[in-house]
Image: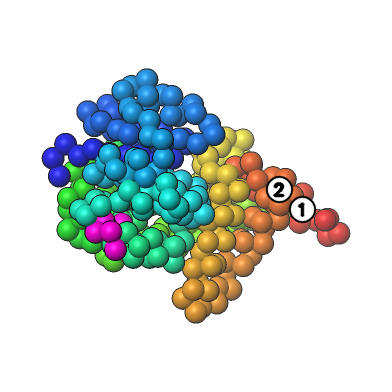
Amino acid sequence: MDDPRIGFVGLGLMGRAMVECLQKNGFELTVLGHRDRSGLDEALAQGATEAASGRALAEESDIVMLCMGTSDQVEARIYGPDGILAGAREGQVVIDFGTSLPASTLKIGADLAEKGAVYLDAPLGRTPAQAREGRLNIMCAGERAAYDRVRPVLDVLGENVFHLGKLGNGHTIKLINNFFAMTTACAMSEAFAMADAAGIEREALYGVMSAGPLKSGMMDFIRAYAVEGRIDLAFSVANAAKDVGYYRRMTEDLGRDSPISGAADAALRAARDGGAGDLMVPQMTDWIATHSKKGQT
């Protein structure tokens, strides 16, 4: 696909960084914002065009990109008389870069296919800073021919770009990945909290645990905060609770129980619902240390 016209929906921290990267690489963009116009205004200042609706954006774009927080938000932009689906057409490719429910992804994909458009799920790894530099990890799934057509654009945004098979596989793998990551983070946070309760220095515990096969990048993220007070993992408790909750809904859709995710889900939801949703995940160490005391509500 030569010189594709790109429409971009969702200019939060990650979305605006991706838009910046695309603009620096010479792509012309049509953008659609929400209540917070800061990311939108940045894009407009660099030459982007603002669309009045999802339908108008789709009508002007060869590739439509969405980078949004929840499946509900994605569906709100896809459906309705002014939604992306209403403006979709034959040969168009729509890409969801968020972390969404696979069941929602499959429904949207089927509806877009009726218009001749193709839906790809392509959740992301890494940070907005790396997005600006075109160094994201992109877990793309869906029709291979459509993936091959948009691959040059994905290569601008990503350092590691994967094609993972049929539609929905990207979101499924991302949710499995985030379930495992957040379960590990919560387990390490509790380990430090229990060391505190036992009068053991956190660094002493880490030294023993990291000397064996338990050592991991996630362990080191939690240790950076627990021992040094430094947050290297800027991922909120609210987002973590959402992703683990989506993972559990996915397992239900698959007809499976998920006993292991239950503990992380309960801890993250309790923290979020108790007003700690804006904390970063490594700060669960302090939250668990406080709220694990017997009789603590």
Q: Is residue 246 above or below residue 151?
A: below
Pointer 2: residues within 10 angstroms few (<14), some, or many (20+)? many
User: Residue 56 at what x, y percent from top left?
Assistant: 35, 40
Q: Which residue is mark 1?
A: 291
- Label 2 with label 1: CB-CB less than 8 Å: yes
* Front in this rendered view, residue 134 or 196: 134
* Front in this rendered view, residue 19 or 223: 19
> Residue 25 lies in what quarter of the image?
top left
Report how many numbered discs are placed on residues in the image: 2
Q: Is residue 199 left or right of residue 17?
A: right
Q: Which segment did they paint magenta?
A: 114-119
The outermost residue toward the top is 45
* Front in this rendered view, residue 252 or 215: 252
The outermost residue toward the bottom is 255
Q: Which mark is residue 72?
A: none
Q: Is residue 59 left or right of residue 284?
A: left
Residue at figure coordinates x 29%, y 36% from the top left = 134
* Front in this rendered view, residue 8 or 199: 8
Residue at figure coordinates x 72%, y 45% from the top left = 275
- Which structural element holds mark 1? helix
Locate the C terminus by quadrant: bottom right
Q: Which residue is mark 2?
A: 287
> Residue 183 lies in what quarter of the image?
bottom right
Task: Examine the residues drawn in magenta and state their main secondary structure.
Answer: loop
Which scheme is used to colour this image of the protein?
A: rainbow
User: Residue 70 at what x, y percent from top left?
Assistant: 51, 52
User: Residue 13 at what x, y percent from top left?
Assistant: 47, 35
The outermost residue toward the left is 2
Residue at figure coordinates x 39%, y 43% from the top left = 54
The answer to whether any part of residue 196 appears in the image is no
Q: CA distance from mark 2 to mark 1?
A: 6 Å
Q: Is residue 46 magenta?
A: no
